[in-house]
Image: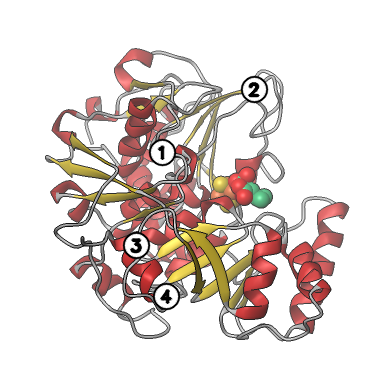
Amino acid sequence: MGMTITEKIMARNSGRDHVVPGELVWTDVHTVMTMDYLGKTCFDKFRSLGKTEVFNKDRVICVSDHLVPPPNQKFATMLNEWREVVKQHDITNFYDLGRQGIAHQIMVEQGHVLPGTISIGTDSHANTYGAVGAVGNAIGVTDAAVAMATGKAWFRIPKTVKFHVTGKWQPWVMAKDLSLHIMGMMNWNGHLLYKSIEFTGPAIESLSMAGRMTLCNMTVDLGAKNGIIAPDAITQRYLKDRAIGDWDMIASDEDAEYDQVYTIDISDLGPTVAMPGKLDDTVPVEKLIGTKFNKAFVGTCTNGRLEDIATIAKILRGKQVHRDVNMILVPASQTVYLQALREGYIETLIEAGVAVDTPSCAACAGIHTGVAGDGDIVLSAGNRNMTGRMGSKKAEIYLTSPSVVAASALTAVVTDPRTLSV
Ligand SMILES: CC(C)[C@H](C(=O)O)[C@@H](O)C(=O)O
Ligand code: SF4
């Protein structure tokens, strides 16, 4: 019996010829990521193992993202402690304020994730790394500390569920819409818990790396262990000048065994929105046309990439954000920010009345800049919409794609980008 791509990666990194779902393996990890919010605790755990030196100073990646620049004294002090501990361990790749970005963006864009390998991080959206054909997984600080000491982590081999996606993307429809569509389709039935999700098919192959990252990123919100897309020519082109290390092209065997296969034709998929409070309560944008909101947010590890910024700039070019809307863009990293600046997107957006904030997680988890207050109705291109997620429990969050956020920002009511004359 053949293996799926995730099984193959877990087998080859644990010195095995073959693995089957349910088995426990002790695998090599290529990189371990930790970030400002949990990193100090992670290093404390590491020290409590009696260790002083990490397994490889180049492959423990430290990123400041949730707390930078510090909005209050508490975060400033946390950052000072974090910087101190990173310095003590002489970590080569420390992306601190000035070189910062959201950890998952940094991991992929700076080449710390390679096809066929395993990278783990102390943040739930480490699933993002599957976009380049790696197994990306979120782990707790204790497992991260062990991995920092040994270069290894344990896994129970997950069963794989395949989403085979065909058809042609409609204008303005983005990978985010497919993510939200799958959320609604699976309706939190628990079936994807601890599964590996593999995306295949022509509609996936036509996605840029940004779209692939969005799709794999949100598999954690489906309850999956990881999300993955086999590397192809697009992956190779993306990694060519950034990958740190060699990699192999790897794919599922023809006779791999899947727990379930779902086929989706995206030709009919339109812009999609998740209703406040529940990720799987998703509706086509048509159902919400005219719904009022007052805050618009584009950013996060899900939708803060250059392609996302290009999309909203295209929609807002030469126009004005409605006076009843506050719109914030937070690029996912300094690199993305600089590229967007050079492309002229930032200028376009500022002229349109968008506030551009320095890269960070921003208001996504309700702890940094741009949080929601009582009565706010937020149209967000982020990834989570539970009550209180962006701040006040009396705020509501609709989740959607950057193109819906931008189109709607022009009118202050939910708007279908396909109806724009751009
Ligand atoms: C702070 C961190 C542990 C958390 C996570 O892992 O998800 C955050 O990134 C989030 O999105 O809520
Ligand atoms: S952008 Fe949001 S979801 Fe992503 S890591 Fe930061 S807080 Fe978590």
Quarter holding the N terminus? Answer: bottom left
User: Which of the two residues, 71 or 300, is positioned nearer the viewer here?
Assistant: 300
Q: Which numbered tag is attached to residue 312? A: none
Q: Is residue 344 in view from this perspective?
A: no
Question: Would you name the residue on which mark 2 appears?
Answer: 395
**At label 2, which amino acid type do we have?**
Ala
Place of residue 319 in the rendered image (x, y in percent of width and height, measured from the top left): 37, 36
Up-down relation of residue 395 to residue 352 (above or below): above
Distance from mark 2 CB to nearest ligand 2 atom below 8 Å: no
- Marked residue nearer the N-terminal end (4 or 1): 4
Disc 4 marks a residue whose amino acid type is Asn
Disc 1 residue type? Leu
Q: Are marks 1 and 3 in contact (CB under 8 Å)?
A: no
Sequence-first tag of 2 and 4: 4
Query: How many residues crowd around disc 4 within 10 Å: few (fewer than 14), some, or many (20 or more)?
Result: many
Residue receiving disc 3: 7
Circle on res. 192: 1
